[in-house]
């Protein structure tokens, strides 16, 4: 393999761009696939898992990789655009070998795998040759142990051993991933490994990831978290996503978690649970940008600049009489952020209300919501109760979640065309 170093550490490959021979980027490295052979033989690295546009993960044989270095991977072109499905004989280095506890043969000392190196051999195959391990991990009240690079055959406990595995090194390798991409990676892990990785995430990161996972994965993960931890994660989720998740749990379990949550957070979720699932009230978030009519344009712009706001919620401010928390006082109307950008900073937002757009009742069905958004070119719509109080906002991303098939996160995108020069099918290395 021309242009490649003699030894490659796999954790450093995570996220690297993959290019075809013409210099066009075709994806990013997400893992390396290895196959364990007979006892005494080094495992073979048979290919890369590459994420291509559409968040599809495909298999690229090592025979198609012409160069690997610290900044990029170059291939002869992707050869099989079918979604990668891990075989029973295959192991993913980043997902399944990092953070694994193994034993040094010479001293019988437990160590933790922090990286794995692969090297080409005389036959042209790539083999797992060395492990970068840390001593003393997992021992309470002890400093982080020393790190050493050891030959693969000087450790035991990697092949075919079911044991609890940490996730720190794996998560460090994918720290830059957006929540949706990390959720895709977690979804493709084995159930055991999925729970280990989820447990290692902090509450905010896990909340973001849960919002992007299929419902079955959400329920599986939440059900194994301790009650207090599960409640903390639910509090960190968007209230509408938390309500959707709780609605999938048995009623007694959902009520126990609501009791453990902060009362104010739980009240927001309870209000959403009152409504049918595919209605404005069931999909809304109760935390839009709400301002009184005498607030200035400058104040409004300061609010919509908040980093934690999604683009849909930052597209407008909602003008209400006090109190300004949902359910508010009388709802007066919305002001588009684009209008705010054209007005003097001291102008009151109450003078800029779009009077053509009315709030939706909480029981508005999904089909009527989509027509409302399309008619008025909106990315979010106000939801009000029978007393004319603002109770939340339903956004276009929530509408899309309910319009798409339930398995849309898992479905292949058959419209994705393979890159020029790729062939539709190449057999996998056995």
Image: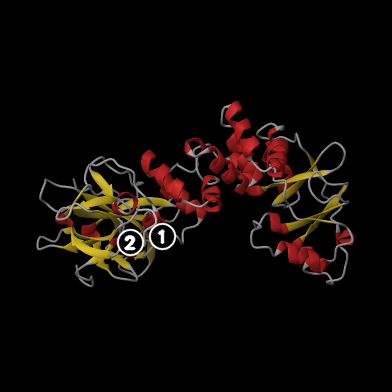
- The image position of residue 279, as x and y in percent, is 70, 35
Q: Residue at 21% x, 45% y: name it.
A: 159
- Closer to the camera, 35 or 199? 199
Q: Is residue 61 left or right of residue 348?
A: left
- The image position of residue 304, as x and y in percent, is 72, 62
For label 1, the crowd category at 10 Å Cα-Cα, with few meaning under 14, some 14 to 19 and many 20 or more, is few
Q: Which residue is mark 2?
A: 11
Circle count: 2
First reached walking from the N terminus: tag 2 or tag 1? 2
Asked which secondary structure carries label 1, the reply is: helix
| Residue 387 visible in the picture | yes
Query: Against 375, is 353 above or below?
Result: below
Q: Is residue 357 left or right of residue 422?
A: right
Q: Residue at 61% x, 42% y: name it.
A: 241
Query: Against 253, is 206 above or below?
Result: below
- The image position of residue 232, as x and y in percent, is 58, 45
Q: Are marks 2 and 1 in contact (CB under 8 Å)?
A: yes
Query: Against 282, is 129 above or below?
Result: below
| Residue 415 visible in the picture | no
The image quadrant where one finds the C terminus is top left
For label 2, the crowd category at 10 Å Cα-Cα, with few meaning under 14, some 14 to 19 and many 20 or more, is many
Q: Which residue is mark 1?
A: 172
Residue 277: quarter of image: top right
């Amino acid at each position: 393999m021309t242009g490649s170093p003699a030894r490659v550490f796999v954790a450093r490959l995570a996220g690297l761009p993959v290019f075809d021979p013409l210099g066009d980027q075709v994806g990013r490295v997400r893992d390396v696939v290895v196959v364990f052979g007979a006892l005494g033989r080094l495992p073979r690295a048979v290919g890369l898992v590459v994420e291509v546009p559409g968040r599809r993960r495909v298999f690229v044989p090592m025979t198609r990789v012409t160069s690997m270095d610290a900044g990029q991977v170059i291939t002869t072109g992707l050869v099989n655009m079918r979604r990668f499905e891990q075989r029973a004989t295959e192991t993913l280095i980043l997902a399944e070998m990092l953070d694994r506890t193994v034993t040094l043969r010479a001293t019988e000392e437990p160590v933790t795998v922090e990286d794995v190196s692969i090297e080409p051999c005389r036959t042209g195959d790539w083999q797992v040759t060395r492990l970068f391990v840390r001593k003393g991990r997992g021992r309470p009240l002890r400093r982080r142990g020393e790190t050493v690079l050891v030959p693969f055959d000087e450790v035991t406990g990697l092949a075919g051993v079911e044991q609890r595995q940490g996730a720190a090194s794996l998560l460090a390798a994918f720290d830059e991933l957006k929540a949706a991409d990390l959720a895709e990676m977690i979804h493709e892990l084995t159930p055991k490994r999925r729970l280990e990785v989820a447990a290692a995430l902090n509450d905010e990161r896990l909340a973001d990831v849960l919002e992007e996972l299929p419902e079955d994965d959400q329920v599986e993960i939440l059900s194994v978290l301790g009650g207090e931890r599960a409640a903390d994660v639910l509090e960190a989720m968007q209230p509408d996503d938390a309500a959707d998740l709780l609605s999938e749990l048995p009623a007694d379990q959902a009520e126990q978690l609501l009791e453990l949550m902060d009362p104010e957070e739980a009240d927001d979720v309870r209000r959403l649970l009152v409504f049918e699932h595919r209605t404005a009230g069931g999909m809304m978030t109760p935390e839009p940008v709400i301002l009184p009519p005498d607030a200035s344009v400058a104040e409004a712009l300061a609010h919509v600049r908040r980093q934690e706001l999604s683009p849909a919620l930052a597209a407008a401010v909602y003008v209400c009489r006090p109190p300004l928390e949902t359910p508010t006082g009388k709802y007066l109307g919305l002001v588009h952020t684009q209008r705010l950008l054209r007005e003097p900073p001291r102008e009151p937002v109450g003078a800029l209300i779009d009077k053509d757009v009315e709030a939706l009742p909480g029981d508005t069905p999904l089909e009527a919501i989509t027509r409302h958004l399309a008619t008025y070119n909106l990315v979010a719509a106000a939801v009000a109760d029978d007393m004319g109080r603002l109770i939340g906002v339903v956004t276009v991303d929530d509408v899309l979640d309910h319009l798409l098939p339930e398995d849309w996160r898992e479905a292949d995108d058959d419209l994705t065309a393979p890159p020029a020069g790729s062939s539709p099918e190449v057999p996998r290395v056995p």
